[in-house]
Image: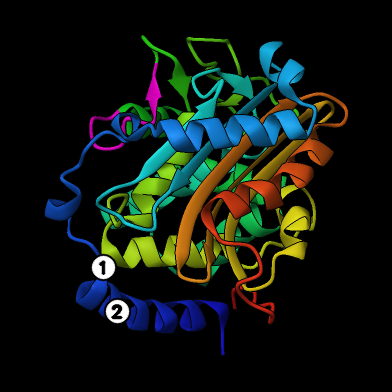
């Protein structure tokens, strides 16, 4: 069976489940995720960072984190450190290209076929720079900026803290359009990246079929490091993820489903050891949402 037919078959099943069991937009009421900041979860995240010896790196602005418990879609809980700090995020903003491509497909301006789905999957799962540049070319740099800054998505605010930004392909070409906040070619804040995954998890991001396809593309991480590596010690997790690495810049973002719980975690680090920081933080952050030791059989997304 071709990858396209396989993904669309799974999408049809999942859409039926989402309609029957998923939260409605009325239930979620389109509330701003920022209003969901939770003092208890915030204190717990701060303790995790302190136990990992990374408090100083947070104070220096070298580490940004966001954690969102979305188990109850109508009552999310948010904690973040340097969540609105605009940072270079390497390949992690490829998730924004994916949103742009699926939004264009939803509008009938980009076909969903074996060629486009394969390119999107390689861009996310294996972080293919060639495919990321190809998909970005299909959408257009200027069009993607419009989508990210639109009232529908509001994933970048040029007059505020910034957010997710892609101003060039992933190749040697110069940046066509740098972000207005920090002049970055590929940037992100932990908060807006977490907000993207929260919207996906609560069926607010795209149409039902495109939400399902996006989760399929994000599934089965093909690179074993950062959050994926750190969650090896926590059996029974399903991870939908996009990471990024370039020189001293390390980023990871994931929607995690584990033993009846669902949560989003995002980390961006500027340090040679940043990738290992994120790997060390993954399991303790998981345990803030999921009671440790609840299962004994490991399972990954298929």
Disc 2/disc 1 C-alpha distance (Å): 7 Å
Residue 10 spot, x, y in % from top left: 43, 81
Question: Would residue 165 be seen by someone viewing this image from the given angle?
Answer: no
Check if residue 244 falls in the magenta segment.
no
**Region rendered in magenta:** 150-157
Residue placed most toward the observer, 221 or 67? 67
Relative horizontal placement of residue 256, taking residue 100 as reference (left or right) = right
Disc 2 marks which residue? Answer: 17
Kindly report the secondary structure that dominates the magenta region of the rendered protein: loop
Q: Residue at x 61, y 53 (%)?
A: 286
Question: Would residue 132 be seen by someone viewing this image from the given angle?
Answer: yes
Label 2, secondary structure: give it: helix
- Would you identify the image quadrant in which residue 15 lies? bottom left
Check if residue 156 falls in the magenta segment.
yes
Residue 261 spot, x, y in % from top left: 46, 63
Residue placed most toward the observer, 101 or 302? 302
Residue 87 spot, x, y in % from top left: 62, 20
Q: Residue at x 28, y 72 (%)?
A: 18
């Amino acid at each position: 069976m071709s990858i396209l037919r396989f993904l669309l078959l799974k999408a049809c099943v999942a859409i039926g489940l989402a309609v029957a069991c998923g939260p409605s937009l009325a239930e979620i009421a389109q509330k701003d995720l920022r209003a969901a900041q939770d003092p208890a979860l915030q204190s717990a995240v701060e303790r995790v960072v302190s136990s990992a010896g990374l408090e100083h790196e947070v104070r220096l602005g070298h580490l940004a984190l966001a954690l969102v418990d979305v188990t109850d879609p109508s009552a999310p809980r948010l904690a973040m450190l340097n969540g609105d700090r605009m940072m270079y995020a390497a390949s992690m903003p490829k998730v924004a290209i994916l949103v742009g491509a699926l939004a264009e497909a939803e509008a009938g301006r980009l076909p969903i076929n074996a060629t486009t789905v394969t390119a999107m999957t390689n861009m996310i799962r294996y972080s293919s720079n060639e495919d990321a540049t190809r998909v970005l070319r299909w959408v257009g740099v200027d069009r993607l900026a419009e989508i990210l800054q639109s009232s529908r998505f509001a994933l970048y605010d040029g007059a505020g803290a910034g957010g997710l930004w892609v101003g060039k392909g992933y190749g040697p070409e110069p940046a066509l359009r740098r972000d207005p906040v920090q002049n970055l070619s590929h940037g992100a804040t932990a908060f807006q990246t977490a907000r993207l995954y929260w919207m996906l998890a609560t069926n607010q991001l795209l149409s039902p079929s495109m939400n399902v396809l996006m989760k399929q593309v994000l599934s089965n991480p093909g690179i074993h490091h950062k959050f994926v590596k750190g969650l090896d010690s926590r059996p029974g997790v399903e991870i939908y993820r996009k990471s990024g690495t370039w020189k001293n810049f390390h980023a990871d973002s994931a929607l995690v489903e584990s033993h009846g719980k669902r949560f989003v975690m995002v980390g961006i680090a500027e340090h040679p050891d940043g990738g290992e920081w994120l790997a060390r933080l993954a399991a303790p952050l998981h345990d803030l949402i999921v009671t440790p030791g609840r299962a004994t059989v490991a399972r990954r997304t298929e």
